[in-house]
Amino acid sequence: MDRQEHPTTTWEAMQDSTVFYRKQQVYSTPGKLPNLGDFIIAGCRYGGPLALMRDTSKLVALGSGTAAFAKAQIQVYSPAGEVLLLFSWDQGKIIRFGWTSDEKLAVLNEEGTYRLYDLQGDYQQYSLGADAAEVGIIDARIHENGLVALTGSLSLLEVKGWEGGKPLTLASPGISQPPHAWAVIPPDLTISRHVEALLSVDATVYSVDNLEATDQRLSRGPFSHLAPSPNGKSLALLTSSGSLWVVSTDFQRSLADFDTSSFTTSAGEIRQVAWCGNDAVLVTFEHMALLVGPFGDTLQYFYSGPTFAITESDGVRIVGPDTCDFLQKVPVSTVSVFRPGSTAPAAILYDAWELFSKRSPKADESIRSIRPELAAAVNGCIDAAGDEWEPYWQRRLLNAAKFGKAFLDVYDATDFVNMGQALKVLNAVRFYEIGIPITYTQYTQLSPSQLISRLTARNLHLLALRISSFLNLQPSAVLKHWACAKILRSKPTSTSKETGVDDEVVCKSIVEKFETLGSAGVSYAEIAQKAWEVGRTELATKLLDHEPKSSDQVPLLLNMKEDRLALMKAVESGDTDLVYHVLLHLHKRLPLGSFFRLIEEGGPALALASKLLQVYARAQNREMLRDFYYSDDRRVDSAVLCLNEAATMSDPVAKTNEVKAAQKFFSEDKERTFEAKMVDENVRLLTLQQQLEKEADGKISFFGLSVNETLRTCLINGMGKRADKIRSDFKVPDKRYWYLKLHALTEVHDWESLDTFARSKRSPIGYQAFVQHLVEKGHTREAISYVPRCDSNKRVDLYVLCGDWRLAGKECKDRGDKTKMEELKRTCPNSLIARELEQFAASMK
């Protein structure tokens, strides 16, 4: 198109010249595309690419150009006719293919297996399940956020999203043969927010969702084409007789009815029914495209061969043999500016700017005439600039808006600036070498970040980075994709040494680029994951060294089986949870010996891991802790563990064996002679206690008691000789033994034996201990008999302790201790005792 050609030259009127449509040639593609009539085609919305696959139901003339038809292939072209991708298919018969919202090609075969291809040919493969594979898939409809498949048993399966989720079965439509035609309305366009399938069955249409199948009770079918509008509110149906009927998707309102049979006679069979925005329907024939308006008005567009139409939210993209066109209803803002004779404020402002450019004084007059509506006029010119394809008219409209806002005292120029930025971006991506013919309306719906994602998917990283910088967006997604692409493209050389050099160079270039452009949102771990997936482990390890988050480093290192490095990184992070994660993972995967050796050989660097392993094993897995100590030749720790185990056991044999094991470990360490001896005595004691229990026929419990408690138990139960033997064997000191026997005999009230024991020899603990213990236990009468055996200077106080003030006074008299007597008189509890003490005192004079 000549840049000076006025926008209205491509307008064509409908509805008594109240509505205009325009067809703009976006790209010229002569000879770039094959004959579209021989292919099954799927087009991606928002200026996306085309996928073509040979239609095997049609005959093709053999020749030099048919080599690609020898096997199933899918070719992907940009709207400008450039080949983006070509790949072969060997996974069974393809039932349907279509595009997802993130510009991936979903390909479904008859066995229910589907793949998602990106524009580099990489794919993820999923399945609809074993049941679908058994009955087979006979047809499907793919929308941007999922698919609906028709199985061989004529049931409908829905897949939500593209993460490989389990398919859901929709309500049974109850049909006995496949529908004549069918379509789906995506869940985001339905009132119920569930996908809805529309099936043409006999003369009617069934509406099927996840809850019910509803017969709409129509009588005009069968329908050969069903096409929902982009907003999901209207449905275009083409009957077998050639009648185009437009109804609301709830079938409550008939919106239009048009007979295409006259065109069918002259133009051949109808190839496609597609919407042009939400207001008109495009019907394509072999060499013609017919646009049908809401009131039956039509516009005809002729092509030299078959075409393919892709419905967009604001129009329809028509790919023909030689051109790629965009057909749309002329936006209101554009009509208000450029329509001949328009008196809209935006048109007057545009005229005023043109007059000003020509230095005409009439410009001021025009501005004055729209002064109250000048802000609206400026906004109108800005909006119209966004709807123009040619930069020439974009600049003129923006200049008009700039001219108008200069006359406004207060005006927010945000929209003006944003529109200028957006048009700069759109013009860049519309360039034929890029080949994304997206309109401003589609751009706002898609979002700038999604557009950048589409550029990175085509490996147009430089343009994506420049747009990100221009729009002040984070470049992290672009940098991540660029790094992954660089790893894939940088092939390692033959020798291992040179491979290492290549890895170093690639790693350095990635790190430098990230540091230069800012890598706040980029994870080196994600890049390293890609390197590892393509077999470049050394490069992955080098990249991980630059990852600041250990929580991202460690899982990948574990997957790479870099066990020591993963454990080192976890320990260096100081995150105990992360260290435990690594330890448990390695314990599960490695042989026990290798696992322990890994920790032992780490030395001080892995000390934290060793300690945490011990803490975990002590609480959860004592057997593993035992093995770890044994593997590390830690005899003392092994002995302590045995003793801890023994402390929790109740079975005598098992407990004795554990203590014996502890004694063995201690005895093997020359520096632990004392501990070995003590544990050996404990073994002897346990053995003796088992023997004592046998002698007592199990009526008395000894096992597990200390030496003192064992002696006490023997004394209480009248096993005095046994107690003496134990005292001798275990060399219990005299003082301790006397205390034990005193307490034991007092406990059983065996006063005769206690007296005999006290008289047996001179007490090593003295007799004051007898008195005090007996008084403490409440046996004051028995305690008094031991006071005379105590030292004379303590007897008075001991008599007082026993509560016998008379004997205390008598002792003072016998000793002639007047001072103590006076003290007794002052502290005595009552007057009766005081008189007795007076008598003793008087007799002393």
Image (cartoon, rainbow, N blue to C red):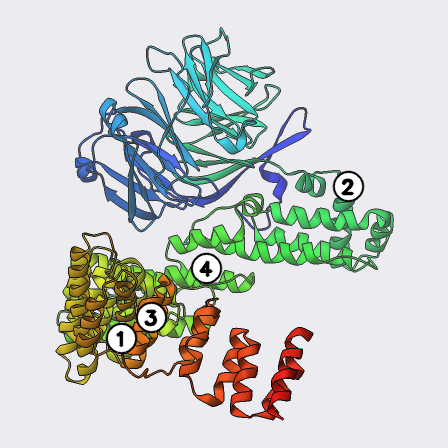
Mark 3 to mark 1 CA distance (whole Å) = 90 Å
Q: Is residue 134 above or below residue 587?
A: above
What is the tally of numbered marks visible in this picture? Answer: 4
Name the quadrant containing residue 681: bottom left
Mark 2 to mark 4 CA distance (whole Å) = 39 Å
Residue position for label 4: 464
Q: Amino acid at mark 4?
A: Ala
> For the residues carrying marks 1 and 4, which lies nearer the camera in this image?
1
Q: Which mark is residue 504?
A: 1
Please report contact status of discs 1 and 4: CB closer than 8 Å, yes or no: no
Closest to the observer: 339 or 572? 572
Q: Amino acid at mark 3?
A: Leu
Callout 2 secondary element: loop
Residue position for label 3: 754
Residue position for label 2: 344
Q: Is residue 733 above or below residue 630?
A: below
Q: Position of residue 521 (x, y in %)?
A: 46, 64
